[in-house]
Amino acid sequence: ETAQDSPELLAKSSHLNSKPLDVSNKAPVKTAQNKIPLAHSKYESSKYELPKWKEALGELVIRAFHLDMDRVRAGPVAGSYYYKICKEQGLQYEDEPLSETAKYFYEDLKLPRTFSQWFQITVLHEWILFVRMRAMPFKYGRNYQQKLVDRTFSDIELRLFEEMKVNSGRIADQYLKDFNTQLRGAIFAYDEGFATDDGTLATAVWRNLFGGRKNIDMVHLESVVRYIYSQLYVLSRLSDREFATGKFKFVPPGVKVEKLTPKQEEELKAKTIAKYEALDKDPKTLPSERSRLSYTN
Amino acid sequence: SSSQVVRDSAKKLVNLLEKYPKDRIHHLVSFRDVQIARFRRVAGLPNVDDKGKSIKEKKPSLDEIKSIINRTSGPLGLNKEMLTKIQNKMVDEKFTEESINEQIRALSTIMNNKFRNYYDIGDKLYKPAGNPQYYQRLINAVDGKKKESLFTAMRTVLFGK
């Protein structure tokens, strides 16, 4: 079974030459000129550095008012970083080459290159993160979910106007409502599948990600189920502290996620605990870097 | 001959799909039903309804398509040309021995919960600390086993869990 051990190779291994409906040229995501950047504001850019005096003032404010950094962090981590990685997975423009991950979705799984398909791919990844966020302490996890959803819709609104050239606020609102309904439906369906069996999960994938494609290739469906569990497995091994500080990234579809042996798992845990114990003890650790979330779970 | 092998495999696939979990709530289309119909056709079996009567495959007429377009504003990207495409695309599929056996293998893998069991994620995510009853309540509601009372419903609205 060595030839099929990553979701991508699995999808590629199929000999069924199915030709799904191609509607790609009906609503392509065209322009790269007015492209909405992954980071909307300069503060989100990885290159941006806050002036030293602003940074010091910030740290002072956090210390003086005992700000709950785990709450504050939801914005930059879930609303910016986690949204960014969800958005990137299926992001594509007609006049640009596809990224490696996007190739898996649009070429291997033969999904149409449309805006709404991008949305479905993004929703799948957001749901994967939701599953982990629910396992955080309730008030923090819920806040992370909220920030991720808020950002999704503000970004879609921008993309509709700037990239898809929707020039009527009323029509944009209609699309947003439609996307909201799709989001709720998809999250519910994936949750149901996660809580019951892989058959139900595959049905949810078929109905949402594949848009109920009649001549679905079962190997593709199997590949996506494998993809989902690989991500969830990695997430289940991360502690709250690591996940909440943005230490997660999606495993590329071309990579097989190997299960850890009990010994490896123990070593990994010990390493994490040592790292955060040292960080918490260190008096030089800045107030903004502190967190009360568990690093042992 | 190989076409006979494909038909036999398609029959196996139909049998497998009949054991596929049914939808807990009603959707516009059911994966199970759509796929059973698809592979019954490949197997050369007539598609029958609940009473055992054979169903003639209905294609929408051009008039029906026109009426659909005129009545609704249409979801994103749906237009006349595409609808005609849909109608034309209901072509017979070509399976080979190899490709149909892959379909059987993939479907069995899904139905046997292979990846759920292999990646054995554990209660950290199945009974999430922030909301341990989340999935149980969802399943109870879907199965209609335990109805939410006004009290629990309001509690969810107000406090989120």
Image (tube, grey):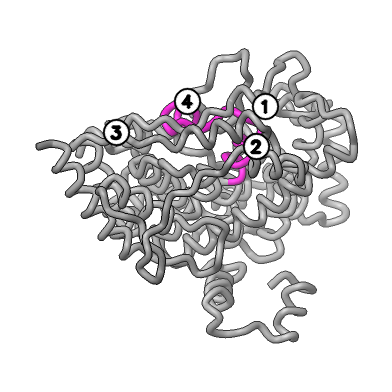
User: Badge 2: few (under 14), some or many (20 or more) residues near its Cα, within 10 Å?
Assistant: some
Q: Closest to the observer: A46 or A101?
A: A101
Q: Which residues are magenta?
A: A103-123
**Mark whose residue sits in front, 3 or 1:** 3
User: Rounded to the nearest whole Å, what is the CA distance between mark 3 and mark 1?
Assistant: 29 Å
Secondary element at image label 1: loop
Residue found at x 52% / y 28%: A22
User: Rounded to the nearest whole Å, what is the CA distance between mark 2 and mark 1?
Assistant: 9 Å
Residue assigned mark 4: A103
Residue assigned mark 2: A116
Q: Are marks 3 and 2 in contact (CB under 8 Å)?
A: no
**Mark whose residue sits in front, 4 or 1:** 1
Coordinates of residue A136 in the picture (x, y in percent): 60, 61
Residue assigned mark 3: B94
The tag on residue A27 is 1
A267 sits left or right of A288 in the view: left
Q: Are marks 3 and 1 in contact (CB under 8 Å)?
A: no
Coordinates of residue A259 in the picture (x, y in percent): 32, 48
